[in-house]
Image (cartoon, rainbow, N blue to C red):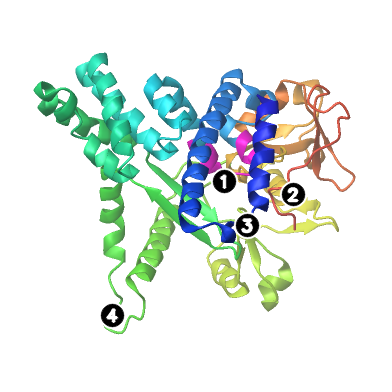
Amino acid sequence: MVEELTQAEAAVADCLDASAWALPEHDLVAALDAAHRLEQRLAAVKLALVRELDGRGTATAQGASSTAVWLRDRLRLGVGAARRLVELAATLDTAPTGVRDALASGAVDVEQVRVIAETVSTVHTAAGSEAAHKAVGVLVEWAGQFEPTLLRKLGSRILDHVAPELADAAAKAAMEAEANRAQRDRHVTLSELRDGRLRLSGSLNAEAAGLLRAAIDPLTAPSGPDDPRSPGQRRHDALADLCRLALRTGELPEHGGDPAQLVVTTSFDTLARQLDAGTLDTDLRLTPETVRRLACDAAILPAVLGGSSQTLDVGRQRRLVTGPLRRALVLRDRGCAFPGCDSPPRWCDAHHIHHWADGGSTSLTNAVLLCAHHHRHVYSGEWTVRLGGDGHPEFVPPAWLDPDRLPRRNQYHRRT
């Protein structure tokens, strides 16, 4: 297969060198159709490869927490796109042969495959395998005329065509399937923009949507007739107010051994003279004015840093030694220190580099932040953890993964 794909890649490269401007219009359209068919056929191959790698457990064997995370680093995808790739590979693997053949022939695209597979699964549950087989043919034919959204809408009444005697019951089943799909697809995504802001997006099920509206709507009203904020800006400010109210209750669960809180790292000069910005433990930046405003209603924990951002001393906010030590780890590691992991500090545990049971001390020079998955992975013993000359953690991979065993570091967390 590798040889065939290499040949196909060379053929595509030849097409890139060709001059599209020289083609007559009908050839240009034909070339576009051919390129689209080829794209879908390659998608079928790619999904088959992803499914096989997922089944073999390649990702976890190489230290990733999931196949989606491994694909993110291997193919440089967004984690959402990588996750959808794994899900679609599983869907296609269990789909009827006709669905896989349609994608392999280039007759449908991957989003249409998702719709067809889910619709056929609903038909199979409601009317059996014979009706499901008929549904594949009808839906593939419709896919030649309709894009995924309209195809899904038409598919909700597919039994009118393949099993009309069961259509009413199927409508109920389709409604339940849609509700299950909404529950499965619920998510909220926080994407960091280059300027430090966050883009908030997601899909809430009906219950969560109702709860959010009930909580946020009273906070979105204009402050007066001269309120200059747009509706979107008022919703933004209302969400921030809602988070402040939740943090003040003291009823939120702890994260990583600390109470739920907003943590800002800054220098004394920043705080006293408004010289520079502050940094949240999620690596987002805050203006000096914002830092000073937050400091008016905050507990301040002093820390002394060395030249390479190594924490030398941390003030005590409470008696337990884990409090200041954990703060030191957050200041140093910024999150899970395992290479390729982007888990934030609040998802991490403190791991003893030299195990406590073997006489290791509870100290900054013997600790590293690891998320739950990589904490378990490191305990397997194949990876060696140590501190580099600059006081930051590095990980030596097993020989079967890298015969040279070159140390690796996490590049996701910005160092200060």
| Extent of the magenta region | 70-84
- The residue at the point 55 percent across, 34 percent down is 42
Res 375 quadrant in image: top right
User: Does label 2 or label 4 sit earlier along the sequence?
Assistant: 4
Q: Which residue is mark 2?
A: 332
Whether 77 is among the magenta residues is yes
Please identify, in this view, whether the residue under mark 2 or under mark 3 is nearer the observer. 3
User: Does label 3 or label 4 sit earlier along the sequence?
Assistant: 3
User: Mark 2: which amino acid?
Assistant: Arg
- Quadrant in the picture for the C terminus: bottom right
User: Mark 3: which amino acid?
Assistant: Ser
Q: Nearer the viewer, residue 196 or 154?
A: 154
Q: Nearer the viewer, residue 208 or 58?
A: 58
- The residue at the point 51 percent across, 30 percent down is 44
Is residue 90 shown above or below 206?
above
Q: Which residue is mark 4?
A: 224
Q: Position of residue 150 (x, y in %)?
A: 27, 44
Q: Which residue is mark 1?
A: 78
Give how far apart the Cα atoms at labels 2 and 4 are: 45 Å
Mark 4: which secondary structure?
Answer: loop
Mark 2: which secondary structure?
Answer: helix
User: Does label 4 or label 1 sit earlier along the sequence?
Assistant: 1
Answer yes or no: do the residues labelled 2 and 3 have beta carbons within 8 Å?
no
- The residue at the point 46 percent across, 30 percent down is 105
Mark 2 is surrounded, within 10 Å at the Cα level, by few (under 14), some (14 to 19) or many (20 or more) other residues, namely many
Q: Position of residue 411 (x, y in %)?
A: 73, 47
Please identify, in this view, whether the residue under mark 3 or under mark 1 is nearer the observer. 3
Answer yes or no: do the residues labelled 3 and 4 have beta carbons within 8 Å?
no
Q: Which residue is mark 3?
A: 19
User: Mark 4: which amino acid?
Assistant: Gly
User: Does label 3 or label 1 sit earlier along the sequence?
Assistant: 3
- Quadrant in the picture for the N terminus: top right
